[in-house]
Image: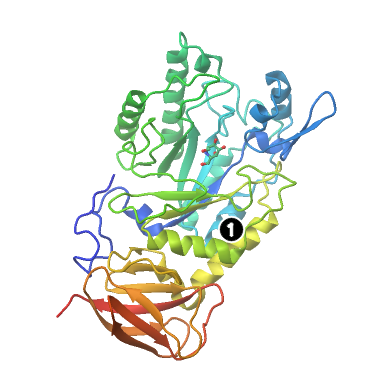
Amino acid sequence: TASPAAGPGTDYATDDPFTADRTTWWRQDRFGMFIHFGAYSQLEGEYTRSDGTVCRDAEWIKRSCAIPTRRYEDVAQGFDPSAFDAKAIVKAAQDAGQRYIVITSKHHDGYAMWPTRQNGWNLRDHSSFDRRRDILAELKSAADDAGIKLGFYYSIWDWHDPDFADPATFPKYEKRMYAQLKELIDGYHPDLLWFDGEWDTDNPVNRWSSRDGERLEAYLRGLDPGLVINNRVGKRRVVDGDYGTPEQEIPDAPVDGQLWESCMTLNDHWGYARYDQNWKSPATLTRNLLDIAGRGGNYLLNVGPDRLGRVPQPSVDRLRAIGSWLRTAGQGRAVYGAGAAGLVAEPSWGAVSRRGNTLYASVRSWPAAGQSLHLGATTPFRVTGARVLGSDQRITVTEAGDGFDLTPSGAAPDPTASVIALTVKPPA
Ligand code: FHN
């Protein structure tokens, strides 16, 4: 876990308060695309039981709907994501302003999305897909061409491998898991591994312990010291790996000195669910990104391709809207390479991030004419300049109480959030 070198608020010229290490690219990129894609996608969120009842879920559908293993294997046999288009997916990420991608290589159902040699339960050997294709290789090539980093999600928990559930044979599963991870690292050279499924569970009882996580992490770092690894390697979650992984939430307080990434869905499911039309609005998603960046975190926003491998249009539309906001008037500077301001209290009217000598106040509720925004300083500093990105209106900055009042001379340039860039200096 990267440790703060100077720490926010002591050296304003520091673009990044953390020491440069393997996570530097990850901290600077801030915004990534999560992809949940696997054999479960073939059902598109719905399963009709033998008694005719319909059961709904996405990547958990085998477990949630108690699908018999043989029946689920038949489903996977029909899986044919012929429309999976790595270049289109990478373009959707680029259009969103997402600078890294994490795709499920193996979810809890144990189905490998690459031609693993450890078992026959994979997209090459157990599907109707073109045996000549390798979607992880296609995605790696497209990501490399676009300058986008690529990570693999890998579930330690495995519902399919009979040796996982049996304490007597768990070491056989662990050996296959190590071998699969070596296949992924040697075969595709990912920049990041996103572990999951390391938690305790009742059925099958998870044999994985924090000790196992520490041993696995050491093994992986031996294979590639540059790998960024999340904290879901061992049960403790806080200590293991390079960063913490809150999910479907934005941590309440800035997590000083800790690296973290919040992962979220665009609707209510990670995997594709045809019936799920509960899409979050582009404004909500953009504001989440700004709130997260202002607290020093990363945002990993998910897409769930359908059974043919296509990213749903509502997902593409929302991602494009976020990217449009980031590209407008350089507003992305409030996110990329930016982090917890460390100088001010979190305001009610928006989010404040900092990059070097500039504070980016992303205002979602712009004051009425003649009204002001208050910025409460927690560390003394001077404001030597203020401007609104995308507008030539003026901002009057006056010292007030514990901080400053910012009074715009015009209307909000952007309904989602308008950014006031403040140049700051240590006290004279
Ligand atoms: O059980 C998984 C779930 O299916 C999904 O992959 C999320 C994504 O972070 N992780 C687990 C739930 O915490």
Using the image, determine if residue 57 lies above or below residue 254.
Answer: above
The reply to whether residue 97 is visible in this rendering is no
Q: Nearer the viewer, residue 144 or 334?
A: 334
Assign a secondary structure to mark 1: helix
| Horizontal side, residue 86 vs residue 5: left or right | right
- Image-quadrant location for residue 389: bottom left
Tell me which residue sits at (39%, 63%) in the image. Answer: 294
Which of 375 and 425 lies nearest the eye of the viewer? 375
Q: Position of residue 15 (x, y in %)?
A: 28, 65
| x and y, in percent, of residue 143 in the image | 50, 51
Picture coordinates of residue 200, whole percent (x, y): 46, 26
Vertical order, 272 against 210 (above or below) = below
Q: Quadrant of residue 280?
A: bottom right
The answer to whether the beta carbon of the residue marked 1 is less than 8 Å from any atom of ligand 1 is no
Residue 108, percent across and down? 56, 30
215 to the left or right of 37 = left
Q: Quadrant of the C terminus?
A: bottom left
Residue 89 visible? yes
Assess disc 1: are there few (<14), some (14-19) or many (≥20) residues with their C-alpha within 10 Å of its C-alpha: many
Q: Which residue is mark 1?
A: 92
247 vs 407, nearest the viewer: 407
Task: Tell whether 133 sits left or right of 24.
Answer: right
Type of residue at label 1?
Ala
Residue in the image at 29% along x and 54% along y: 256
Q: Residue furthest top?
A: 168
Would you place residue 138 above or below residue 331 in this image?
above
Write the residue at 31% across / 69% down. 344
> Which residue, as the protein is rendered here, is positioned at the far left?
428
